Image (cartoon, rainbow, N blue to C red):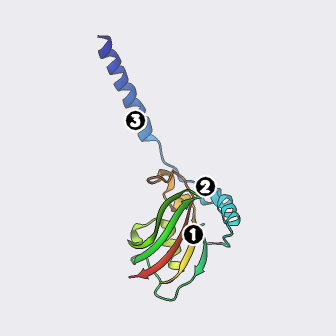
Amino acid sequence: MKKVFFASLFGILLFVNNSCVKNEVCKNKSVDSERASIAGYASANGIAGTEHSSGVCYQIINAGSGPTPTGSSTVSVKYSGKLLNGSIFDNQTATAVSVNLGQVIQGWKIGLPLIQKGGKIKLIIPSSLGYGCNGFGTVPANSILYFEIDLIDVN
């Protein structure tokens, strides 16, 4: 009888706990709240960045000379993605990968059209224009992201 009681109590507590978690609202950090962290990272890492109206900080290393990607373009890129603590969360520098710009994070949709085919750009992306309050894979929630991207081709 005690086992049934404790099992039922555990089940109720688990249900109540999970119900509370499901009702919590994910809230992205504002770009303004991350501006100082972005500027500090840029300064500490020698990035002479320009701030886009969205809050993305970018430095064009090479503007390129081919076509400019649009929101519907498929691009071939080589890139490295880091958190501001230096942890690499994605590294595709050996072989180019193709991605549709309509299916990437907002920071890439903003940054890649700033260069042309053959260009290279550094992006510091506010968390709300990256993976936001949900995070993704090994990227924690509300993480500012740093990318170095070589735009190999635009289709």
The 10 Å Cα crowd at callout 2, few under 14, some 14 to 19, many 20 or more, is few
Mark sitting on residue 19: 3
Compare marks 3 and 2 and give the one earlier in the sequence: 3
Of 98 and 33, the residue lying toward us: 98
Position of the C terminus, as image quadrant, is bottom left
Compare marks 1 and 3 and give the one earlier in the sequence: 3
Position of the N terminus, as image quadrant, is top left
Judge depth for marks 1 and 3 and give the one in front.
1
Q: x and y percent of residue 101 in the render?
A: 42, 72
Q: x and y percent of residue 12 in the render?
A: 36, 25
Q: x and y percent of residue 53 in the render?
A: 60, 71
**Distance of label 3 from label 2 (alpha carbons):** 34 Å
Judge depth for marks 2 and 1 and give the one in front.
2
* Residue at which label 1 appears: 123
Q: x and y percent of residue 56 in the render?
A: 58, 68
Which amino acid lies under the numbered mark 3 shown in the image of this protein?
Ser
Residue, x 41% and y 40% (percent of image)? 22
